[in-house]
Image (cartoon, grey):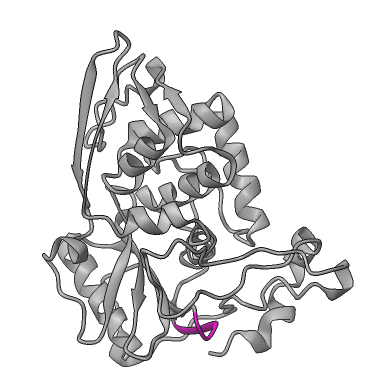
Amino acid sequence: MKCINKAVHTAACIVTVLSLTACSSKLSMPFDPDSGDGAYNITLSGPASDVRPFAADICVTDDDFEASMLAIDEADAGGLFDATAAETIYAKNVHQKLNPASLTKVMTAYIALKYGHLEDTLTASSNVYITESGAQLLGIQEGDRLTLEQALNALLLYSANDAGVLIAEYLSGSVEKFAAVMNEEAHKLGATNTHFTNPHGLTDEDHYTTAYDLYLIFNAAMEYTEFRKIINTTEYKSTYKDREGNSKTIEINTTNAYLKGDVAAPDGVNVIGGKTGTTKAAKSCLILLSNGPNDHTYISVILGSTDRDSLYKNMTTLLTGIN
């Protein structure tokens, strides 16, 4: 489905939100994660009458369409988007509201990079103590001091939920206030079927988004060099200080099985990176950025896969649509 032809019709309800700013340009292709240049450049190009429509450079789909060779039967929703051609290749339940688990952290990182400073020092409160069973934690303690750059690596690379709380309180003073910012920013991006209640994605019945909205959010996060760098990283080492000034070590590895080499992408497809997510409610989720053999770059997302094995099986199936 070619998206550009539907842009004005589909985005009519959200054009007014962003009518005063130009939308992001398409990703430079092929995508180079080591490039210092922004993948997207937001510029004002004159009066509002000269600004291009909100959806001119993004994939738009108002329905589902599934090719039999890309069937992902073991997942609740999924989509494959050609970021170069602004074309939706595959869509299954892409507007269904679902729990996104840690894919939520893409939105947290987007806001942190938009409003924060990588060199800022973040001091942990007692709220970083998360007791939910199975929650991924860096082990941050009250009084620990990390830079935003360190917190973002823990958030995106290791999926540390305590790092999400640390970032939320740094930017907004509380998780609740940060969630309000998340929702406002999501709606500005056109992610109008999204409602967040926390910065990490731990289960809450009022915390939901869609596969298509996650594409929009990930698409926006790609504007930032640091985001592109972190999602392409396999391991990260650093040190920070506790409340007494003692050094503590961060030594973490990616949770992405493609980057770890545990799962192979289809021939001709190069997985740049992405974000994983797993909870009992959300099941297994994944969003990826990949390069194809045609020098196009793609964003793919799967929500609600039954388990880790089926998640990567489904994603690999989806990625075959790139060839």
Question: In the drawing, does residue 288 fall left or right of residue 138?
Answer: right
- The single residue placed furthest to the front in the displayed view is 36
Question: In the drawing, does residue 185 fall left or right of residue 80?
Answer: right
Residue 165, located in which quarter of the rendered image?
top left
Residue 81, how many percent across, how many down?
A: 46, 78
Is 85 a magenta residue? yes
The residue at 36%/49% (across/down) is 101
Residue 135, how many percent across, how many down?
A: 26, 36
Please name whichever residue, 199 or 292, is drawn nearer the observer in this view of the structure. Answer: 292
Residue 267, located in which quarter of the rendered image?
bottom left
Please name whichever residue, 292 or 169, is drawn nearer the observer in this view of the structure. Answer: 292
In the image, is residue 171 above or below residue 38?
A: above
Question: In the drawing, does residue 310 fall left or right of residue 285?
Answer: left
Count the marks: 0
Is 188 a magenta residue? no
The residue at 60%/60% (across/down) is 191
Please name whichever residue, 105 or 194, is drawn nearer the observer in this view of the structure. Answer: 105
The residue at 76%/72% (across/down) is 12
Question: In the drawing, does residue 255 fall left or right of residue 85?
Answer: left
Residue 190, how many percent across, how many down?
A: 64, 62
Question: Which region is colored magenta?
Answer: 84-89
Which image quadrant: the C terminus? bottom left
In the image, is residue 294 above or below residue 219?
A: below
Residue 233, how many percent across, how many down?
A: 27, 55
